[in-house]
Image (cartoon, rainbow, N blue to C red):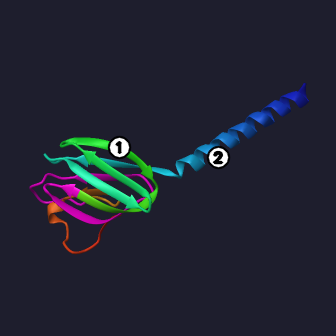
Amino acid sequence: MNKKFLLVISLVLLLALFVATAAAVAKTTLAELEINNKSDQPVSISLTNGNTFYYLTVPPESTKVFTVKRLVYDRTTWACGTSDSGTVDITRFMWLTFTRCAGAPNWGEPRLEKVHVPDAPGGINWFYK
């Protein structure tokens, strides 16, 4: 009886290890991007990396969470009647909060960026951390 019990316990532990490893591998291929649009206009972002392309849109005064591949993307952002281009590193969870179209921006902490497109620096490849 003890040998059978040990065999069953060993199989259960091996199965648990296999499931945990599979979950960890699956987790590393996708990341979440939360976009909080506090403006009175829609916000859109296009993300491109090789053959991977996303076009994300968030209605005014709402929040959406998107699941994308963990990559560094070339991006174009449209908000408040203007656009801005650069790159965005989505290799882990990221929050982007778009402020009101009128008013001073409050940049926020790294990985919790507050984006104010009308005041974005012109002529540079702006990088969301």
Q: Nearer the viewer, residue 75 or 15?
A: 75
Image quarter of the C terminus: bottom left
Q: Residue at x 21, y 42 (%)?
A: 59
- SS class of the residue under badge 1? strand
Q: Tell me the quarter of the picture where residue 45 sits.
A: bottom left
Amino acid type, callout 1: Val
Q: Which mark is residue 21?
A: 2
Q: Which mark is residue 65?
A: 1
Return the x and y of residue 127 as percentages of the image width and height.
32, 67
Image quarter of the N terminus: top right
**Relative to 56, is 119 above or below?**
below
Q: Which residue is drawn at 53% across and 48% down?
A: 27
Q: Tell me the quarter of the picture where residue 23 sits.
A: top right
- Crowding near the residue tagged with mark 1, few <14, some 14–19, many ≥20 C-alpha atoms within 10 Å: some
* Left or right for 98, reference 55: left
| Residue, far left | 102
Q: What stretch is highlighted in magenta?
A: 78-107
Q: Which of 82 and 127 is in front in this view?
A: 82
**Relative to 23, is 120 above or below?**
below
* Cα distance between the residues tagged 2 and 1: 25 Å
Return the x and y of residue 35 as percentages of the image width and height.
29, 48
Amino acid type, callout 2: Thr
| Residue, far top | 1
- SS class of the residue under badge 2? helix
